[in-house]
């Protein structure tokens, strides 16, 4: 090497040393393709300040629901804030019978969703921490060769953003990303706790049919988790099907015999179904298990209520109820 | 800020007294909701749900003041859990509100560029 080349090489090494955030190709999981683009994802150009409704219409559309941003604005937009809050995007997703699942805060989760063919709604801070510019966009793909994220954003149907800039803007927005799922679809990296939280939200919003499908899918994926059986039982009960509810509560109890909530609920439906003896036994067990917990009052109230219920012909004969 | 802190203290106080009242008041018999069961299993802060329930009126009023159609507010809040409503009650004015993708000012662009070149933001998991 000629002596004159040395300073240049040193400078290059120095620059490489502080090259900053890594390129997409350096972080992309080995199992992921080099590029993905979900070209069929619809596009809704945003009105002023309304990137929230536009982005939500985009992901709802991709999940099979054609909704116009104009219909979503009254459900999500806050004029005085000139924008949309994250929790209200979640609420509006539930109102459309879709599961709102907040993804874990790493790029692998974004890539995994794209690999399932689902776009991801995410929050970006296009400014800096002390001067934030909040913006919602939809990630529809990436290209590791060209080092870009591909977005539906604002009025741009296909925005290519340099990967480091995209990653930085997402990072500065707390790495918030939302998967909008048809009930039955579960993200590859989902945990039962987080998925349960999503379905409870759907149930709380009164979307019983969607919640039932989501619970069924969760039970198929995590059959050993008693809370999904409990939730499915609660939806069946709300739907006016106490027999189905009783069977679900029974499964929850078999998996977790100390589950006071499932015992309490089983006692309630057994009482309604005329199986008063067994109802009293389960209610007593629930009250015992709930002692000292937040369910204590409810369980004692249920015990008192079923004790007063008349015994008529039990509509669930021949079951082996747990001790 | 001080008013905010005072307001929060009031909410906590009222919530706490309601919770202690709840100890004496008879609870309704019947089904334990899934959210309630999870909160009990996780021994979550019992104040969160109480606070959320109390906060609904407060949030409704403030959303209307921010220009949300009064006829829409109830349906919007009905889609949220108690914990989410409590979050709105506490931080309605500070939570990020995604709006426009405004053109970034020159000085901010420079700051961003420096951040990108010097900071190391790696969003992928290290394996």
Image (cartoon, helix red, strand yellow):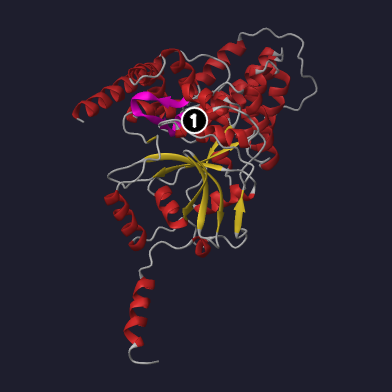
Q: State the quadrant of the N terminus of chain A.
A: bottom left
Residue A79 sits inside the magenta stretch: yes
Q: In this image, B5 relative to B24: left or right? A: left
Q: Is residue A201 visible?
A: no
Q: In this image, A322 relative to A105: left or right? A: right
For the residue pair A58 and A220, the one nearer the viewer reads as A58
Picture coordinates of residue B39, whole percent (x, y): 48, 31
Residue numbers of the magenta segment: A76-89
Q: Name the chain under label 1.
A: A
Picture coordinates of residue A17, whole percent (x, y): 37, 72
Picture coordinates of residue A230, whole percent (x, y): 62, 29
In the figure, residue B52 lies in which quadrant? top left
Residue found at x 40% / y 49%: A169
For the residue pair A45 and A17, the one nearer the viewer reads as A45
Q: Which residue is mark 1?
A: A53
Q: In this image, A109 relative to B53: left or right? A: right
């Amino acid at each position: 090497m000629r002596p004159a080349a040395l300073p240049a090489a040193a400078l290059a090494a120095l620059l490489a040393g502080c090259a900053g955030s890594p390129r997409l190709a350096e972080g992309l999981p080995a199992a992921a393709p080099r590029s993905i683009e979900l070209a069929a994802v619809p596009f809704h150009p945003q009105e002023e300040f309304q990137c929230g409704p536009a982005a939500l219409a985009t992901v709802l559309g991709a999940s099979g629901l054609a909704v116009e941003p104009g219909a979503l604005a009254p459900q999500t937009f806050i004029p005085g804030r000139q924008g949309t809050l994250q929790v209200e995007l979640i609420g509006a997703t539930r109102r459309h019978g879709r599961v709102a699942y907040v993804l874990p805060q790493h790029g692998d989760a974004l890539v995994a969703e794209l690999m399932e063919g689902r776009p991801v709604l995410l929050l970006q801070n296009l400014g800096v921490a002390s001067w934030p510019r909040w913006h919602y966009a939809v990630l529809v793909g990436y290209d590791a060769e060209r080092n870009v994220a591909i977005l539906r954003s604002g009025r741009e149907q296909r925005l290519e953003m340099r990967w480091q800039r995209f990653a930085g803007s997402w990072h500065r927005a707390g790495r918030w990303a939302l998967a909008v799922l048809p009930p039955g679809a579960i993200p590859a990296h989902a945990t039962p706790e987080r998925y349960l939280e999503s379905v409870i939200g759907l149930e709380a919003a009164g979307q019983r049919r969607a919640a039932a499908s989501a619970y069924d899918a969760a039970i198929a994926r995590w059959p050993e988790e008693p809370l999904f059986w409990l939730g499915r039982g609660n939806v069946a009960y709300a739907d006016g099907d106490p027999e189905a509810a009783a069977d679900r509560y029974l499964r929850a109890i078999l998996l977790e015999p100390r589950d006071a909530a499932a015992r309490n609920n089983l006692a309630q439906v057994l009482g309604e179904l005329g199986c008063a003896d067994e109802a009293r036994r389960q209610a007593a067990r629930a009250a015992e298990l709930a002692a000292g917990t937040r369910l204590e009052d409810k369980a004692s109230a249920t015990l008192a209520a079923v004790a007063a219920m008349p015994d008529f012909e039990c509509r669930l004969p021949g079951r082996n109820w747990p001790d | 800020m001080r008013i905010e802190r005072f307001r929060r203290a009031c909410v906590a106080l009222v919530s706490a007294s309601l919770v202690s009242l709840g100890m004496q008041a008879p609870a309704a018999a019947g089904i334990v909701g899934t959210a309630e069961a999870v909160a009990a299993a996780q021994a979550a802060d019992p104040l969160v749900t109480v606070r959320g329930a109390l906060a609904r009126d407060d949030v409704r009023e403030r959303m209307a003041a921010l220009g949300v159609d009064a006829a829409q507010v109830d349906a919007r809040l009905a889609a949220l859990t108690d914990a989410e409503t409590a979050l709105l009650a506490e931080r309605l004015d500070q939570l990020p509100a995604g709006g426009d993708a405004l053109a970034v000012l020159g000085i901010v662009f420079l700051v961003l560029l420096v951040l990108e070149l010097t900071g190391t933001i790696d969003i992928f998991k290290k394996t």
